[in-house]
Amino acid sequence: MRLSIRDNGRYLIEFDRLEVQGRKAVSGCGLVFSLKGSSPGTERNVDIIDVQLGLFQSKDSSFIVPSIPFADSLRQTSQYSNGNENFHFEVALTLEQINAIEEIRQDGDLKLVVTLKALLSSSSGLERSYERSEVVVPRDVWLKALRSSGFCRTVLYEIPFPASDVDIEGLLAKARGFIETGHYKDAVMQCRHIIESIEELRGDKGEAKDANRKAHGSSRKEMTSIERLLSLREQLKNVCQLGGHGREAFTRSQALSVLGMTMALVSEPTVGASVILVEADADRGEV
């Protein structure tokens, strides 16, 4: 990455690194983007004001965050400004914005186009500086920033199911973890393990298969609501089978949808159920 602030074609500051850190915010997810570089010094004093960082999707230059203001209001350079420079840009993104970024990133690194705009003031008047550069934020760095930002905040959500030695709560947490780290096929297969555990708990595996056959026959209009839900669960299990077998690939949004549907079926009231509390991410529909 190479970004710079120039005065009449001369480098005032040149940046070669972009770092990202998470920060808790009252509303949304706080992120701090830091440009790091150096200043060679200048022959005259120059005030750098109105510095703005822009983030764009590298594929088609669509806006992600068009303008993030410089955390400091003013930076001055002179002949004595020879040294390291750190510019910090702080922003609070909504969950919708983060999810949109994650749809772009999928399971890889985050590839961005970064723009840097600044207004320069010196004895010769005002001048604008503008540059853009492609940046790759490593996957592990981005995931760490998201965790620190509070992106995976949870609330309590009640899910009733019978007491059992099967650790369904642990299976749910594992599926969610697979999605957060980009292992979408593993998350989908984990959902199949959850459904099979529910079948074992409820003892209705045969009924689900019968209901699914009925759903594809001439008597489907006569099906009860329970039969239709059992058929839906059987269909979902067939989708989850692709997570462990075959060459089918899953996107993040598909894995989230499968997990959401799995949780909806798990939360169906069952006979002899005992209510337990499970951590659920209500904002993103995950458990």
Image (cartoon, grey):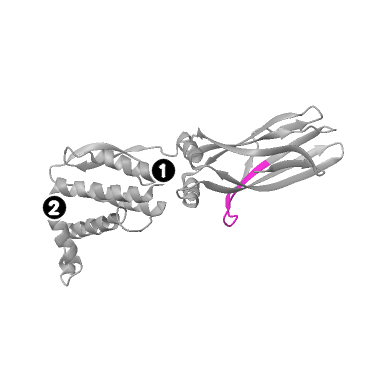
When asked about the image quadrant of residue 242, the answer is bottom left
> x%, y% of residue 136?
57, 45
Q: What range of the chain is rendered magenta?
A: 52-64
Alpha-carbon distance for marks 2 and 1?
A: 33 Å
Q: Secondary structure at mark 1?
A: loop
Q: Secondary structure at mark 2?
A: loop
Q: Quadrant of the C terminus?
A: top left
**In front: 232, or 275?**
232
Report the number of numbered marks: 2
Residue sitting at x 54%, y 37%: 31
* Res. 181 mark: 1
> x%, y% of residue 235?
25, 59
When asked about the image quadrant of residue 208, the answer is bottom left
Circle 2 residue: 204
Q: Amino acid at mark 2?
A: Asp
Any part of residue 120 in sight: yes
Mark 2 crowdedness (10 Å alpha carbons): few <14, some 14-19, many ≥20? few
Mark 2 or mark 1: whose residue is earlier in sequence: 1
Q: Quadrant of the N terminus?
A: top right
> Magenta stretch mostly in which secondary structure?
strand
